Image (cartoon, rainbow, N blue to C red):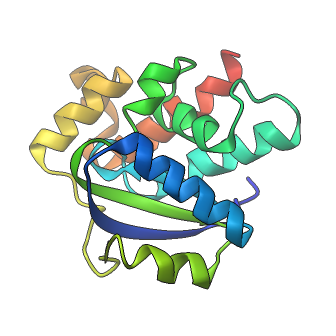
Amino acid sequence: MKTARCDIHQFRLDITCPGEFLNYSRDLGASKGATIILFNADRMAGRAHVVSALCHAFRAFERGEAISNTVEMESLLYAAGSRQCEVGMEFGVHPGENRVYLCICPGNDPVQKDLEQRGVYCNEEDWEQFSAEKQCLLQELFGITDKELAVVGISRLQDLVIERVALLEVYR
């Protein structure tokens, strides 16, 4: 699968009004020739899940097959494995403290520097390990049964989530 042309960072920020922040990020990206996409890390099965959602979304736009108006929303839909915008939005930012995968497409140092004023980069943290609570959440979000997980093993949870992301193309 061709990779999206994005820099992906782990980022923490506090958001009072998600709509205002998304307008800010859209305007910032547009002014610097980039698209900014933010994924709620608490609902993502790691970096590979982010990469998969981005690749599918950019490919859908390149082929004229997108179901949303923006690559940002298309990315969230793929992350959620859903055609429903309300479900996709759950994979974006929310009011309060956010742990996000910040995607800057294409990579853009001026955008990265401007965003430093809004939050903290935390790329050194390990977001690939899933707590028992996160495992349960991912199973619930993606309809992964205990039986299915028992067959493949907990180490394959990320693969099962990415499989659900890919299935969105089939169900279009």
Which percent across, then down, holds residue 153? 28, 41
8 vs 62, left or right, is: left
**In front of the other: 113 or 12:** 113
123 vs 48, left or right, is: left
Q: Is residue 92 visible?
A: no
Q: Quadrant of the C terminus?
A: top right
Which percent across, then down, holds residue 62? 86, 43
**In front of the other: 110 or 168:** 110
In the image, what residue occupies the spot 88% across and 37% down?
A: 63
Q: Residue furthest left?
A: 132
Which quarter of the figure has residue 59? top right
Which percent across, then down, holds residue 40? 35, 47
108 vs 102, left or right, is: right
Give the total number of marks visible in the rendering: 0
Q: Is residue 130 visible?
A: yes
| 88 to 145, vertically: above or below | below
In the image, what residue occupies the spot 18% across and 33% down?
A: 136
In the image, what residue occupies the spot 64% across and 78% down?
A: 108
**In front of the other: 88 or 135:** 88
| 154 to 88, vertically: above or below | below
| 43 to 151, vertically: above or below | below
In the image, what residue occupies the spot 34% across and 37% down?
A: 152
Which percent across, then down, holds residue 145? 28, 21
